[in-house]
Amino acid sequence: MVRFKNRYVLCEVVSEDPRCRQCIEDRALGLAVRDAIARVHGDYGLACCSISFTVKYLNAYTGTVLLRCRKDSYRLLCSALPFVRSLESRAQRYPCFLNTLHVGGTVRTCQKFLIQYNRTQLLRLLQNCTNEEEKQCVQKSLLSCSLTEEQSQSGDEEEDD
Amino acid sequence: AAAFERRVLRRAAEHHYLRVRLELPDGGARPNAAQFKQLVVTALRELHGEVGAALPVDVLIYEEKTLSAILRVISSGFVKLWSALTLLGFYQNRRCAFRVLQTSPFLLALSGNSRELVL
């Protein structure tokens, strides 16, 4: 009856440096976020947010990150995310920033939002395509994800080519 | 006869005032007013980070001889300030402790202390 409620924060890692993609790892990202919380909210904030803190899902190709924390401290976490300015891994530091997309109560709602968001992002990519073969690839992915309800339940997660 | 009416305002005060005393058991140099405020802000920064260090805290009265002071803090930051003062242990690598003697939402209430009443 009384259970621990979590909040799942969906963010996207945005960086100008293309090499940053390969250094997006769950441990490096977790350390960067915890370090930002310690700077902004001190020892108390760090301890509060670390109770059930983990990086639940990470997609290095699209830069999508799903963080989990307790419901009581998700505001501390969300307010510290703009202070994450660089990711460090293997003695290399790359500047980046985190865009918060969605805060949900379960992984399933975050996944539903992510599918919707990826569909709109594909449409936007189609508009910004420069050459013909990129356009063909994006059009193919768009067609494959815009099928009817029964068929689209299998293979909902699409990747950028 | 006029009807009796009682009005209770909870959490209506804007600031909270604390009378504190800093205990430095070793007889070394005493901090002046600026160093005292720096110490309070450092305590807030350690426990509550940059957000805590940015709380509007004022040192209204400071007596260097007795190391006691009257602090004013915005009411929403009262718990943060008191917890930060409690957990501060060191001033320039010397052991120290904050003792909170009186607190009140009204400054006038800090002028009398019934604990030190001589009957």
Image (cartoon, helix red, strand yellow):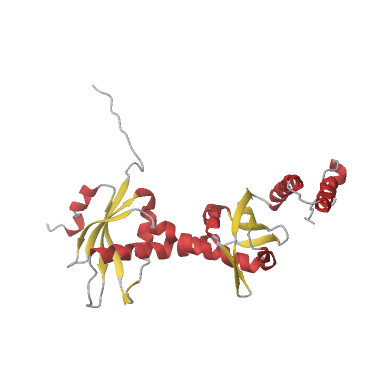
Work out whether residue A158 or residue B102 is closer to the camera in this orientation and state it: A158
Left or right: residue A134 compared with residue B3? right
In the figure, B24 relative to B9: above or below?
A: below
Report if residue A42 is visible in the image. Answer: yes
Please identify the quarter of the rendering in which residue B29 is found: bottom left
Report if residue A77 is visible in the image. Answer: no
Percent coordinates x, y for residue A61 in the rendering: 73, 60
Work out whether residue A79 or residue A121 is closer to the camera in this orientation and state it: A121
Q: Residue at x 55, y 61 (%)?
A: A85
Percent coordinates x, y for residue B97 in the rendering: 31, 69
Question: Which residue is the extreme one toward the left?
Answer: B119
Work out whether residue A62 or residue A109 is closer to the camera in this orientation and state it: A62
Q: Residue at x 87, y 45 (%)?
A: A151
Percent coordinates x, y for residue A107 in the rendering: 69, 53
In the figure, A127 relative to A11: above or below?
A: above
Percent coordinates x, y for residue A160 in the rendering: 77, 55
Left or right: residue A97 compared with residue A58? left
Question: Which residue is the extreme one toward the front?
Answer: A131
